[in-house]
Amino acid sequence: MRIWHMWKGTFQTIFGRVVKEMSDHTGLSEGDFGVLDRLVLFGNGSLRQQELADSMDWDKSRLSHHLKRMEKRGLVMRKPLDLDRGVQVSITPTGKSMLDDARPFLSKAIRKHFFDQLTEQDIDLITKLAERTNTTS
């Protein structure tokens, strides 16, 4: 259990530092970045709201409330789909610009708080561990 708590605590510390640094420089929260990034990566700028929720592992209500706040800030827009009860979520030019501005800060923070702390041997071991644990059920 000691190793588990160390692993979990280390991840949470590093993740918290990375998110704080990105947020301080861009004004985007972790959730904002996640939504904008997935819209671009998985949907070329637009996804059905349910697909977005599934990709983030968020429930429908949580995502809906978050998107409402993002809409007010001009980062995304939602529109009902004509053929069914679905909703299409699209990134706005403002949202795309903020995402593009955030990516270098995020990369720099990940490097500073994670990769710069590792040796090549550490990276090899972490890679092997990740590959092994991602293939087991």
Image: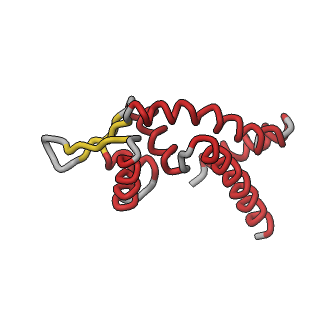
Drawn side of residue 96 relative to residue 116, left or right? left
Drawn side of residue 137 relative to residue 43, left or right? right
Give the quarter of the figure containing the C terminus: bottom right
Q: Residue at x 25, y 46 (%)?
A: 87
For the rendered model, the colour scheme is secondary structure
Q: Which x, y percent locates residue 133?
A: 65, 50
Q: Residue at x 40, y 60 (%)?
A: 62
Q: Nearer the viewer, residue 120 or 94?
A: 94
In the image, residue 95 sits, relative to residue 65, either above or below, namely: above
Q: Residue at x 38, y 55 (%)?
A: 63
Give the quarter of the figure containing the N terminus: bottom right
Q: Which x, y percent locates residue 5?
A: 74, 66
Q: Residue furthest bottom?
A: 1
How many numbered circles does the render carry? 0
Q: Which x, y percent locates residue 108?
A: 71, 35
Q: Residue at x 69, y 58 (%)?
A: 12
Q: Quadrant of residue 3?
A: bottom right
Q: Nearer the viewer, residue 28 or 57?
A: 28
Q: Which x, y percent locates residue 110?
A: 70, 40
Q: Residue furthest left?
A: 83
